[in-house]
Amino acid sequence: TSDGKLHIMPPTDRKTSSRNLEIGTQLKLWARQHGGLATDPSGGFVLPNGARLAPDAAWISLERESDPMSCPNFVIELLSPSDRSRITHEKMLDWLANGIELGWMIDPKRRTVTIYRRDREPELLTAPDQVVGEGPVAGFVLDLVPVWA
C-alpha cells in the first residue's frame, strides 16, 4: 500500500480463477484488436502514491505503458468468496485517486457490477448480462453470462 503495508492474499478458489480467466480472455481479445496491453492478476502496477496493486484484469494504453510509475487506464476487480466488498471498494477508490479512468468491481455472489468513473459517484448495475465499455475501453463489451454461471 502507499503507507508500506503488505496485504497477503491467499490463492482464490477454482470458480473465481475460472471467472478471472474468462474476464481476462475477453479483455485480451479486445486489446489485440484495439491496441494497448491487457494484464491478468499477476501483473502489478506501481502507482504514483507508491502503492503496488495488482487488479484482476487491466488495460493500459501504449502511451502509459512506457512509464513504469503509471496507472492502468481501466481495471476490473472480481470479488472472490473471501473478499470483502468494502475493502475492494477502497481499492477501487485508490485506483481512481491514482489515475484510472474507468473501473468495474464485479460481485458474482450478488450478481452486481459497480462502475467507477472519475469525478462521479459509483454506479451499481444489478444482474446485467453484459457491461459496455466507455472512455478508454469504448467498444469493449464484457459478456457476464459465463461469469454468472
Image (cartoon, rainbow, N blue to C red):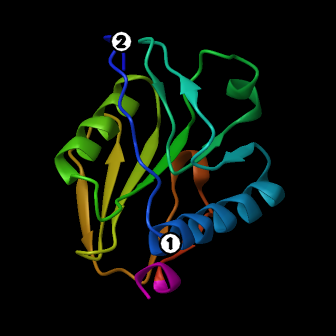
For the N terminus, the image quarter is top left
| Residue range of the region highlighted in magenta in the rendering | 145-149
The residue tagged with tag 1: helix, strand or loop?
helix
User: In which quadrant of the rendered view does residue 22 lie?
Assistant: bottom right
Residue in view at x 57 percent, y 48 percent: 41
Q: Is 51 rendered above or below residue 61?
A: above
Query: Mark 2 or 1 closer to N-term?
Result: 2
Which residue is under mark 2? Answer: 4
Which residue is under mark 1? Answer: 14
Looking at the picture, which amino acid does disc 1 mark? Arg
Counting other residues with Cα less than 10 Å from the Cα at mark 2, is it few (<14), some (14-19), or many (20 or more)? few
| Residue farthest along the left direction in this orientation | 86
| In-image side of 8 versus 11 (left or right) | left
Residue in view at x 28 percent, y 58 percent: 82
The residue tagged with tag 2: helix, strand or loop?
loop
| In-image side of 115 versus 19 (left or right) | left
